[in-house]
Image (cartoon, coloured by chain):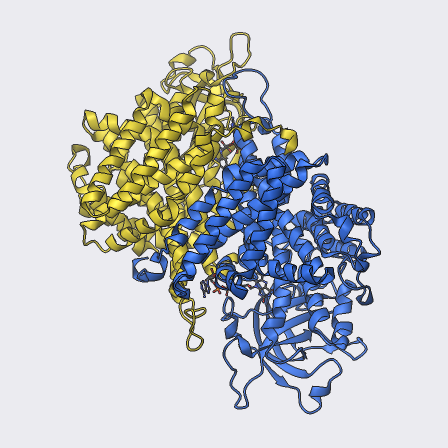
Chain colours: A yellow, B blue
Amino acid sequence: MQRGLLRTLDFLLVEWLELGSLLQRPRFADHSVETCGELLAMASQLAEEVFEPANRVSDTEEPRIGPDGGVVLPAATHRAWEAFRSAGIAGAGHDHADGGLQLPRTVDMAVRAVLSAAGPNLVPMLLTEGNAALLAEHGSPAQRRAFAVPQVEGRWTGTMALSESQAGSSLADVATRAVPDGTGSADDPLGPRYRITGDKMWISGAEHPLTDNIVHLVLAKVPDDDGTVPTGTGALSLFVVPKVRVGPDGELGERNGVHLVGLNHKLGMRGIPNTALSFDAAVGHLVGAPGQGLAQMFHMMNAARAEIGLLAAALGYAGFAVSLDYARTRRQGRPRGVRDGEQVPLVAHTDVVRMLLAQKSYAEGALALALYVGRLLDDQRTGDDGARARAATLLEVLTPVLKSWPSEWCLEGNSLAIQVLGGAGYTRDFPVEQFWRDQRLNMIHEGTHGIQAMDLLGRKVRLRDGACLRELGAVLSATATRARSAGLGEWAADLERSWGDVLSATDAVWRDDDASAALANATPYLQAFGHVVLAWVHLDLAVAAAGSDHPEAGGRTAAAAYFFAYELPRVAAWLAPVAAGELLCRDLDPALL
Amino acid sequence: MQRGLLRTLDFLLVEWLELGSLLQRPRFADHSVETCGELLAMASQLAEEVFEPANRVSDTEEPRIGPDGGVVLPAATHRAWEAFRSAGIAGAGHDHADGGLQLPRTVDMAVRAVLSAAGPNLVPMLLTEGNAALLAEHGSPAQRRAFAVPQVEGRWTGTMALSESQAGSSLADVATRAVPDGTGSADDPLGPRYRITGDKMWISGAEHPLTDNIVHLVLAKVPDDDGTVPTGTGALSLFVVPKVRVGPDGELGERNGVHLVGLNHKLGMRGIPNTALSFDAAVGHLVGAPGQGLAQMFHMMNAARAEIGLLAAALGYAGFAVSLDYARTRRQGRPRGVRDGEQVPLVAHTDVVRMLLAQKSYAEGALALALYVGRLLDDQRTGDDGARARAATLLEVLTPVLKSWPSEWCLEGNSLAIQVLGGAGYTRDFPVEQFWRDQRLNMIHEGTHGIQAMDLLGRKVRLRDGACLRELGAVLSATATRARSAGLGEWAADLERSWGDVLSATDAVWRDDDASAALANATPYLQAFGHVVLAWVHLDLAVAAAGSDHPEAGGRTAAAAYFFAYELPRVAAWLAPVAAGELLCRDLDPALL
Ligand SMILES: Cc1cc2nc3c(=O)[nH]c(=O)nc-3n(C[C@H](O)[C@H](O)[C@H](O)COP(=O)(O)OP(=O)(O)OC[C@H]3O[C@@H](n4cnc5c(N)ncnc54)[C@H](O)[C@@H]3O)c2cc1C
Ligand SMILES: Cc1cc2nc3c(=O)[nH]c(=O)nc-3n(C[C@H](O)[C@H](O)[C@H](O)COP(=O)(O)OP(=O)(O)OC[C@H]3O[C@@H](n4cnc5c(N)ncnc54)[C@H](O)[C@@H]3O)c2cc1C
């Protein structure tokens, strides 16, 4: 699998996203296209040798609570973590000053794609990286030194502790309380010191034996003077709460009041312990200003949403690669009309090619979108003023797409991988069933599909009077123009038509400015929007391929051809109820269900 | 779950399929609408008390090979089987003379739906019933007595042993051999006696401790005089091969040469042992004429395909029921714009209603289609000449739809059930994840989706110069006419338009009579065709509901409204590449994948 993936990534990074020119920027002075390629090759070897063999084990030997109350993980996971840590890439995108490599995000994400395709269950770094990045952005210098640096160096890991049993989609209902820790607490060198009390649910990686410490970023509310916990998200503040307390110079102190209550037993992604966690007057330090909790947490949530899109793409790729391999070797049946002679490989059957092309277009399209978002993150950090503003606007609208589209369509792709293997795909002798189970999470965590849809249609497309749509529309138009020059005018026209349909549906939906009606079909809108964005990705890739003799070029055109012929027509089906303002689901008497 | 299901079944059977008039036929003289209702209520109690609690256990305590080489199943499965057996409904549709109840197939299928919704893993009867039915149709009177009757009575179970490792989709490649068992073997009272040798793969229920004997129906080939095994499906013959040999009066003799080689470890449907089986000069008796194996086996395969559609529908229903229940009790969030006060039940959110309505339309639509097929099977057996011919023609074309549509869309439904539960749906604390895993099998066994598609577009729509399409078209038209009278003219028009699109696509595809081009998009064709058939089902149900005060009537209209607004528009998307004669997947150089 890794060989094909490296080739695809090379095309995406170098030919498509112009890594060479990105690396001219001062922040990336240490890196060249060659050293990035070497880094990817190293990650790929790590993936193949350590992550891939450990991935199944992490599924069958689920995390469990050991006699000492800690979490027990299989030896293979320990080995994978150790290998990852000592590769020095845990915080590869972070500042040199914090122990990072100042690698572009684009390349950092490509490295993660390589690792995730081999061992999605073994990448607790997902949250760690975002945790450190949030602290680098919003933490005080002391917090950054004490809590972010050890994560960048791979010595500790991090979590995001938002959800509670009664507060999943509705973070306004978080009930965890934070009270100032007595006199002098406001002047704690690590930030105002509070005592945190409450029960969190679903927290990933909140307990494991891999590192000495775990950094929890916790949403909690400071009670009013009369002791009641205020309602709403405006009352949320953010606290950094280490598992083991940390002295002013970063030395480990005593165990903090954070307790593992239990482990959740999941359908997939079993390698990462998922916990019910209780905070019992745990010491925490306020990050940023009180009441800014959710706004700051969005820094991490947006990063996590992008990471989930990337993970989903990588998992989709893994299924594609395994099923392609199988289809090339398994012999079954003969071409239509032929009755005798040897059976042919599955890949000789048209319907099998269809299932492989679909997977290819889902996985590689999703991967491209994720890296494009990575490129925007780089622009946001290192571009000129215009590029920064443009990147910020595009990120607003592309984040819900990247969170949702790969998680829906690479799930479909993983299902097709099973289907290509036939009966064998339904057994645990092949990894495709695990990919499918693992993938199923991605539509749920970090804001469900439905929540992403409301974010897109309820907020993002309306921001600054439609600025996101204008910016994205400009990107699409530019591609269409270049596509026409490259002889791809038919696809350009299809793309423009679909985008036009999305724009009219957006207008129609908001005409009366009635949110409950407008958002009644937010999910089909998200689906349509996502497919149009991916059509753009495929077209833009095909344009890049048209002028290229890269070995990937032919595959790019094939994936685009599939997407335009088989996928883009779906947009009209999703937009039908959106454009019609269908209110069936809003107005139905639930007793009729 | 059972209460809602019984209510739905009552509507389908009594109001829609006119069970009352069916029961007037002489074969069903013992039954009335009331006794059928009582039978369903009994089955429902059995389902709730015995099947439902055992279903999870059958998943977590997977079948294993015990010290004596037999298969070990959990105690709960033994209890479920015993309860099922003693309920006397194992072969409820069979003749009184064979120990059956002469229940209409329609009702028999409703009973199985009730049991399957509660315990899909506990229903080894699926193949048993079809095995007995094949023998009743094609076996000699002695074979029927010796092998079918004990299955109808629930004393033994049966299998279908077609597949081999190298012969899954391609049954032409079956290599199991059958040679006459010496002199006098042709005159064996149980049918010409052969010795069967070969290795079968994927055989469900081929070894278990629930009954004294297991009846295998085996496809094998009689070698040519020079000892070579002929190629092709025309060489397949059918043999009945009991696990334990049977004397002329049905008494059990010695163990036959059938050996369990191993168990397959599956993603789901773990309750039913799935085996690799070897036949080592096992004694078998020829059923029917040599070379008629596949034709006869199609009797069982068609029955099994219908059963799979029914099982898929039942599983879809199970997910719907669990998630509806959850959505009514789980509180999360508030209506848009409301910031304070109690959280509301999930079912108050429009997007959750969308997910529930989708599931409802998939599961109940699939259930209705399955029972409609049951009704056709009843007509085929007990109708007048015209009804028989019509039923036979409709069954040809509806069998691949019933096999494929529920398995695809109730899988989507089961995924939505997970989604409605959010994080909870991803845990093993709720049954929805198991439903989803169990369901995934249904697109694979008994002919994959791709094979069903080629059967539909390559064979069924072309039979007798399009007779199936004409017959089905007539049914659709009749519904459209009644729909117009019932004030449902808009849906009638939508249905007719979509059906017209399917017909033109069919014509376009076969214009050049080039099979490899025509079948290049067989799967999207199958998908489009299936959605149109289901639109018809929903419209026909809505027509029946329009004139009814049955408590189900409102739900029928809601499901139809959902289907016409959100689902039927997909048809155009699938037909786009079909009608365009897209050959991308046929002509692609596989090196580009
Ligand atoms: C394996 C796993 C790992 C996780 N990791 C973390 C983690 O590390 N940190 C963390 O903080 N959380 C984590 N989560 C929690 C995750 O973010 C929540 O599960 C998710 O936000 C959904 O919340 P919920 O489970 O309470 O579902 P609910 O909020 O109850 O939602 C159930 C369903 O109702 C829908 N719904 C809810 N409200 C509305 C509404 N207003 N309008 C329309 N539809 C609505 C949802 O879309 C969903 O389909 C994890 C969850 C899982 C399963
Ligand atoms: C749990 C389980 C239970 C089963 N129970 C039974 C049983 O009781 N009895 C029994 O006899 N069998 C049983 N089967 C076998 C089942 O019918 C086969 O798995 C199925 O027919 C597919 O065959 P295969 O697995 O060899 O896949 P393959 O035939 O190798 O197919 C792999 C993929 O290639 C596609 N493909 C293959 N040939 C073509 C072609 N010519 N054109 C286009 N596409 C093609 C298929 O659609 C599929 O997607 C069972 C299987 C499973 C998994």
The x, y position of residue B506, in whole percent, is 45, 56
Point out the image quarter for the N terminus of chain B.
top right
Q: Is residue A367 visible?
A: yes
* Residue in the picture at 45% in, 68% down: A332
Instruction: Please state the horizontal and vertical placement of residue A31, each as a whole percent of the image.
Output: 19, 41
Residue at left 49%, top 58%?
A: B453
Which percent across, then down, holds residue A352?
41, 59
| Residue lying furthest right | B30
Choose between A447 and B225: the one closer to the eye. Answer: B225
B163 vs A439: above or below? below
Q: Residue at x 71, y 42 (%)?
A: B11
A499 versus A484 height, above or below: above
User: Looking at this view, is A39 or B390 the one in front?
Assistant: B390
**Residue A100 lies in what quarter of the image?**
top left
Left or right, A442 with reference to B218: left
Determine which quarter of the picture holds residue B243.
bottom right
Q: How many numbered badges does the structure rendering display? A: 0
Which quarter of the figure is the C terminus of chain B placed in? bottom left
Residue B459: give x, y in percent of width and height. 51, 64
Picture layout, residue A198 above or below residue B387:
above
Q: Inspect this view and state whether residue A121 appears.
A: no
Residue extending furthest toward the bottom: B183
Task: Identify the residue shown where x is 82% and y is 67%.
Answer: B97
Front one among A194 and B163:
B163
